Amino acid sequence: MNISSSNPAQNPLFQKVETAKNRRGKVRDTHINLAHGSGGKAMRDLIDDVFVNSLDNPILSQLEDWASFDLTSLIAQGDRLAFTTDSYVVDPLFFPGSDIGELAINGTVNDLAVSGAKPLYLSCSFILEEGLPIETLRRVVESMKKAAIAAQVQIVTGDTKVVNRGSADKLFINTAGIGIIRAGVTPSAHNIQPGDVIILNGELGNHGAAILIARGELALETEIESDCQPLNGLVETILKVCPEIRAMRDATRGGLATVLNEFAQTSNIGIRLNEQAIPIREEVKGICEILGLDPLYLANEGKLVLVVKPEHAQTVLSAMKTHPAGKDASIIGEAIPSPSGVVLLKTTFGAERIIDMLVGDQLPRIC
């Protein structure tokens, strides 16, 4: 696609772009074909009609092959740059509560947010399979637009490629993002100490369960929806009351269990969880029992795991509960001196079992 930027305006997300024209209607085709990736008129019409028409902003409207930013305004917001990238191949493209477009925005926003950064700018690249309905692509791009506005970020550059029918599965998206890390905010698994408290912002496993249902693998009638949501607003709320967060991570592939194993191994401490304190919907538990899955390993797309000093735990928990993304937050465990590198779960029966690192993949193409 090669859509890009120059010189951002003040609060450009919500300003009308005076130079932008209504580009809708340029694409007459109903499905993607190889000409849409040729670099010629068909490709330019696709970019104008589907992408720029929906995602336009003062940066993107310059239509250069790069994005440039005013360093002075960036430095005023923090002292370090955060940069991340991710790819999205979820199947199906649309599932209860969300879709691949919203997922691509929120996933990258959340990776930046848990670094302590304020997410600002995103790129997006599309791999399109020949034969993909244009209307499907429009739905995805419109969803990305809405998600970007909700997360207060801008999509400022991108690219598109078209591959032969059968060389991909409908649509893949790659997003990259940059943000500014505030001075004095340094979350890292290396910071965790025995006695620290572990907090989770809400129910586990909803995304994984929603994907299972959308694939038709279970003939169930349920209202479970993906938890896909941006977490940067919640992180802002947390950092206002406690900038000294020990560690933060979003629990995506591999779920809560994988995040906590990474924490334990990196910091050379142990972690003990309280099973009764971990919020999981009964419907999700039921699905896991039927399929022999463990909800602690199910993927999430809107769940934040953070570690704080014990004296800050109640303050942070109270602040989280004031935000919609943290209203079901709970303290689920603590860091312990030993066994080093091991995550233990205190079950509802009073026994303890080891929660090991995930081996294999419970559910492929989950994001």
Image (cartoon, grey):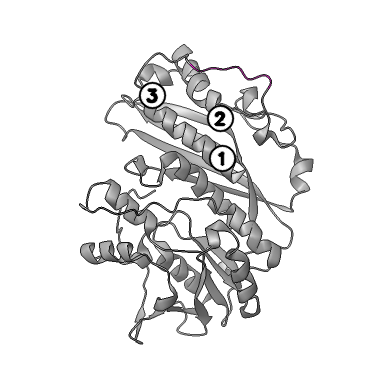
The kind of residue tagged 3 is: Ile
The crowding category of the residue bearing disc 3, from other C-alpha atoms within 10 Å (few below 14, some 14 to 19, many at least 20), is some
The kind of residue tagged 1 is: Ala
Q: Is residue 39 visible?
A: no
Q: Quadrant of residue 156?
A: top right
The secondary structure type at the circle numbered 3 is: helix
Find residue 264 and report its horizontal and vertical position in percent. Answer: 48, 74
Q: Which is nearer the N-term, disc 2 or disc 3?
A: 2
The residue under label 3 is 134
For the residue pair 33 and 243, the one nearer the viewer reads as 243
On screen, 158 above or below 175? above
Looking at the magenta stretch, what is its main secondary structure? loop
The reply to whether dot 2 and dot 3 touch (C-beta < 8 Å) is no
Residue at image location 60% in from the left, 62% down from the top: 322
The residue under label 2 is 55
Q: CA distance from mark 2 to mark 3?
A: 16 Å
Q: Quadrant of residue 206?
A: bottom left
Residue 274 covered by magenta stretch: no
For the residue pair 221 and 237, the one nearer the viewer reads as 221
The residue under label 1 is 148
In magenta, the rendered stretch is 18-24
Q: CA distance from mark 1 to mark 2?
A: 9 Å
The secondary structure type at the circle numbered 2 is: helix
